[in-house]
Image (spheres, rainbow, N blue to C red):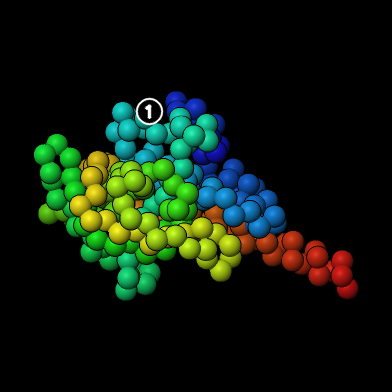
Amino acid sequence: LGLPLSPDYGGFGGGAVDLMGVMEAFGEALVVEPYLPTVALGARLVARAGSEAQRKALLPAVAQGELKLAFAHAEAGARFDLAHVNAKAAQAGAGWKLEGEKKIVLGAPLADRLVVSARTAKGISLFLVACSDAVIEPYVTLDGMRAGDVVLAGAAAELLGEEGAALPLIEEVVDFATALGCAEAVGAIKYANEATLEYL
């Protein structure tokens, strides 16, 4: 869990190449734990966008296995357009309130906190939301992973990073997670190939 996180927060400072071996092993065993949503999406966004206080509050807990995260970004009709964000965020006192729906949020039913994308007057921004403040409709995906649709109806939120500056970070983190998903697929293919050859 701490492999890609900075040593400043209890991690080991690894990168995508270090994680590929882990993901390949997960693919061989068809592991369905929420590792990718927590480490490669949620924690990476916190590490890239969060303030020092937010990093210190969240990343050591992720490294120690005490906190699970999920990234709530995809919306109905978005297809593969990462800039398609209709969820809205409005300031409410010292914090924010979110309105909108997110679809197929991997790891959401198991998460403690959500990293949510939403639009403000300045553009696409990221927010931290406690899962208890959102309505999560859980289900199991075709590959056995846990996911959920998330409804945000005035959910209390904390701004993560600079307002309106989230899209480049989202694009970078999604690319990072996609590479790891490919490594996981390699592991699954390797196992299937070996099992087929053994059977033949």
- For the point 55% across and 54% down, which residue is it? 180
Q: Quadrant of the N terminus?
A: top right
Query: In the rendered view, does 109 fall on the left or right side of 46?
Result: right
Tell me where residue 134 appears, x and y as whole percent: 31, 52
Residue 17 visible from this viewpoint? no
- For the point 47% across and 49% down, which residue is it? 110
Query: In the rendered view, does 98 fall on the left or right side of 142?
Result: left
| Residue nearer the viewer, 86 or 110 | 110
Query: In the rendered view, does 192 fall on the left or right side of 145?
Result: right
Residue denoted by label 1: 56
- For the point 46% across and 32% down, which residue is it? 61
Tell me where residue 2 appears, x and y as whole percent: 53, 35
| Residue nearer the viewer, 76 or 10 | 76
Q: Quadrant of residue 167?
A: bottom left
Residue 170 visible from this viewpoint? yes
Q: Quadrant of residue 12?
A: top right
Tell me where residue 90 appears, x and y as whole percent: 14, 50
Label 1 neighbour load within 10 Å: few <14, some 14-19, many 20+: some
- For the point 24% across and 41% down, which residue is it? 158
Q: Amino acid at mark 1?
A: Lys
Up-down: is 138 above or below 69?
Answer: below
Query: In the rendered view, does 96 fall on the left or right side of 3?
Result: left
Up-down: is 129 above or below 12?
Answer: below
Q: Quadrant of residue 156?
A: top left
Q: Quadrant of the C terminus?
A: bottom right
Q: Secondary structure at mark 1?
A: helix
